[in-house]
Image (cartoon, rainbow, N blue to C red):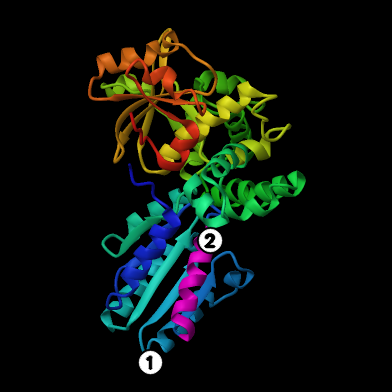
Amino acid sequence: MVDIENAFAYCRQALADRLAEPAPGRIQILTGPRQVGKTTLLLELAEVFGDQSVYAAGDDPDAALPGFWERCWAEAEERAQKKTALLLLDEVHRVPDWAVKLKGAWDRIRRKKIPLHVVVTGSSALRVASSSRESLAGRFERLTLSHWPASALASTFGLSAEKAAYNLVRFGSYPGAVAFEKQPARWRAYVRESIIEPAIGRDMLALGVVRKPALLRQIFAVAVGTPAQIISLQKMQGQLQDGGALETVAHYLALLQDAYLIAPLEKYATQVVRRRAAPPKIVVLNNALLSAMHQEGAPDPKRDASRFGQWVENACLAFAVNQNQQVSYWREEPIEVDGVFEGSWGKWAVEVKTGRFTMSDLRGLLEFCRRSPSFQPLVLTAPGDEDIAKKHGIRAVSWIDFLVGGPSVNN
């Protein structure tokens, strides 16, 4: 069975281990989507260190006041005079010139050998990563707290594996939204106001590289309206109210990816030129974004089987992306493969079939594996349909089991 990473538990343990080392160690930078537990993790660390910790948030109103940065460091360094202390800077990317300031402060405590650990978080991958690479080279270690898998939902909220997988498809996996799932209006408001709007309206616009905010929002809307679909940039461009060059559309898709919202998958090809020339397959990295933006909300698997199947495919591909697998798709008209996985799970060609199917529906999967024999074929089926593929010697697992345990199969 493959190892399914519970990113929250992994990051918690990794930080605990690193903060147990002599201080000052390297700066710990924790990045990831909004509302997946970064602040919760910092507050847990603050509780462990007690009076020897200082917590400050870059998006707090006080952060805009003169001297905010200096006061945080002065207080942390004062506490470090007694014994090892911990400075926690949440949403650090909201502080102007944070990377330069952090470099200067860290270099100072290193020179003075002040026993102070530093942990910072940021929700914008682009801003945090680029700034840290430019100014903090050799001074930091990075951890990513990704979107939660179904197994984390099950263990945290006491759900069965089946219930956790179904909920992930219909409502996504933001832990803070779970309590509102039986109140659709409240749930949708939470996702829109606590996740989507801050990510697009604040984090991304603060980067200073979005000159057409309305166009960015339209591209996001088109993307969440076409989950697990191959769509050319030209076709996407035609659905936009505001005009935008193809380069701008591609750039904004990349920004949405850096904000942990969208993943435009490339076509699998051995030649880089062919791979980049193909249209992307859009994967929304958390199904909560689909449900919050769709007028009818989450699909019922019986009344809206087609849309539910599309959302299952999106959830399966997003799961692989969020588990740090390299994910692409393959298509040679008229056949295609839903997903091509490479990484710690191994090499898999994956077809998602939530309805009844025959072997003729797997022609693309078999042809791809004939051309690329290093890949194993895998069919993700509705529960109970696994034998349709297995009796022909093709590995199969239900999409529920896949979302819980990955591509583990027992033939």
Q: CA distance from mark 2 to mark 1?
A: 30 Å
Quick check: marks 2 and 1 in contact, CB under 8 Å?
A: no
In this view, the mark in front (2 or 1): 1
User: Which residue lies at the image location 28% right of the left edge and 84% below the top edge?
Assistant: 112
User: Which corner quadrant holds the N terminus?
Assistant: top left
Q: Which residue type carries mark 1?
A: Lys
Earlier sequence position, callout 2 versus callout 1: 1
From the top left corner, tell me how far across and down residue 318 is, in percent: 47, 37
Is residue 251 visible in the rendered structure shown here?
Answer: no
Check residue 199 in the rendering and tell me which mark sits there, or answer none: none
Q: Nearer the viewer, residue 15 or 111?
A: 15
Residue reaching furthest to the bottom: 82
Q: Taking the image as drawn, is residue 24 in sight? A: yes
Expressed as whole percent of the image width and height from the top left, the position of residue 353 reads 49, 21
Q: Secondary structure at mark 1?
A: loop
The number of numbered discs placed on residues in the rendered structure image is 2
Range of residues picked out in magenta: 37-51
Q: Main structural element of the magenta stretch: helix, strand or loop? A: helix
Q: Say which amino acid is labelled 2.
A: Arg
Label 2: how many residues lie within 10 Å, few (<14), some (14-19) or many (20+)?
Answer: many
Secondary element type, mark 2 = helix
The tag on residue 82 is 1
Q: Position of residue 98 (x, y in %)?
A: 45, 64
Q: On the rendered structure, is 385 left or right of 236? A: left
Give the farthest residue toward the left: 374
Most foreground residue, 355 or 102: 355
Q: Which dot marks residue 94? A: 2
Q: Would you say residue 246 sits in the magenta stretch?
A: no
